[in-house]
Amino acid sequence: MTQTSVPDVVIRRLTTYLQTLKHMAQRGEHVASSTEIGRWAGVSPAQVRKDLSHFGEFGRQGLGYEIGFLCTQIERILKIDQDWRLILVGAGALGHALMNYGAFVTGRFQIVAVFDSDPAKVNTRVGQREILPMERLAEIIAERHVEIAILAVPATAAQHVADQLVACGVRSILSYAPITLNTPRDVHVRYIDPVASLQTMTYYL
Amino acid sequence: MTQTSVPDVVIRRLTTYLQTLKHMAQRGEHVASSTEIGRWAGVSPAQVRKDLSHFGEFGRQGLGYEIGFLCTQIERILKIDQDWRLILVGAGALGHALMNYGAFVTGRFQIVAVFDSDPAKVNTRVGQREILPMERLAEIIAERHVEIAILAVPATAAQHVADQLVACGVRSILSYAPITLNTPRDVHVRYIDPVASLQTMTYYL
DNA sequence: CAGACATTGTGATATTCAGCACAATCATTC
DNA sequence: GAATGATTGTGCTGAATATCACAATGTCTG
């Protein structure tokens, strides 16, 4: 309702609601009930309403939620109604794939610089961007006001690079390294690890 | 302690404990306390102990956990002490990157076949594997006893492909499509979506 | 080998999160 | 314009999850 620290799971569900709403909008719909949103997002209607109620009253009784309006509101809440500049550290196979990933080329998350510690890679190009040496990390981060970094380096280097990023003022890290990073509490880290995901699924087989 | 339906979060943490333990083993350590494991995995010592206690008593009072033994036990619990055959659907840029991803080339999760609906791609190669048409999905899944699939197709096709996979007997899906899949309750789905991860982080900035 | 010390496993407690149920409210129909 | 039907927002309740605290049990030292 007000500012009483919204649970992290709620924030994560907001992104799925947004996905769902965008799809509905593309299908030409204009209004969605919590039941509909919940069905497509895989959560209960009550959950949808309660989640949204953390941030205000966006629906109309008897009708539901106006899709365009709710999209705008969620985007505002998540602060994705603006462009964000990212940097990418690690120009290996994964780094190349990320540079060419559509969402990072055309979307609101834009990779503005790529770094690698390998001198052989520095000054070569990936996509349209030149690979920069780690020495220029601080400079670029300050210059471009970067707050988010994608970490695509080997596990052995991940903690060291993360320390550098934090020292340079980065406050959010999306890490592809299969290791839990040790960072100050005000730095947010998310992990993407396909193998870890698979390992949790085999348990149920 | 026994088989009283262990929470999913516990299963997910087991994978991080395993990561941590592997790193410790590589550093030449032989014993780890719950405090140490917790510090590197980012959870409280009590949490580590309680999580492990769901499956048995693996530690020794006054000493801690024997790293090699605990690794073996966790691998057994997660059923990753065996090889798993995967199929990959979608041979776009992401599919290519996944095929060349080290863990899927040398690890215990092996991609045994790649499928794509685009006739132009069928019969071309990605890595060392030939891209197969979707028509052969059922045949290969049955022949190779595949239970896990990686979904790397556009969001618009994801639900349709997922339905096919489920119909063919696949019981776990790792989806890279930015959409919540509608599947029977006994089919497990995990999502990997970098943009969604980033969207949850900007909230805190 | 006895005493000091460290660490586990777990019952009890606290906290967080999800589901329920219904009053409040609005569109729509007749 | 009143009655009907649908849907929201939310206090309350219950379930799930995390934390605490300590007895139990082992190691290690002198």
Image: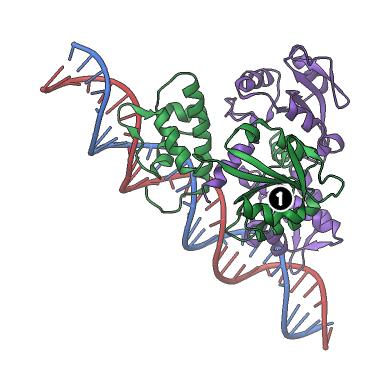
Chain colours: A green, B purple, C blue, D red
Q: Tally the numbered discs.
A: 1
Residue D17 in the image: x percent, y percent? 56, 50
Residue B118 located left or right of residue A78 = right
Q: Is residue D18 toward the left or the right of residue C9 in the image?
A: left
Which quadrant would residue D25 be assigned to in this image? Answer: bottom right
Of residues A12 and B173, the one drawn nearer to the viewer in this rendering: A12
Q: Nearer the viewer, residue C10 or A52?
A: A52
Q: Residue at x 80, y 16 (%)?
A: B132
One can see residue A50 in this view: yes
Amino acid residing under circle 1: Thr
In the image, residue D26 lies at what x, y percent?
A: 78, 68
The residue that mark 1 highlights is B16
Which quadrant of the figure has residue A105?
top right
**In-image side of A38 versus C28 (left or right):** right
Q: Chain of mark 1?
A: B
A120 shown above or below B164: below
Q: Residue at x 62, y 39 (%)?
A: A110
Classify mark 1: residues with Cα within 10 Å, few (<14), some (14-19) or many (20+). Answer: many
Can residue B2 be seen? no
Image quarter of the C terminus of chain A:
top right
Q: Position of residue B103 (x, y in %)?
A: 82, 39
Report the front residue among A18 and B61.
A18
Residue B178 pos. (x, y %):
60, 30
Tell me the element at label 1: helix
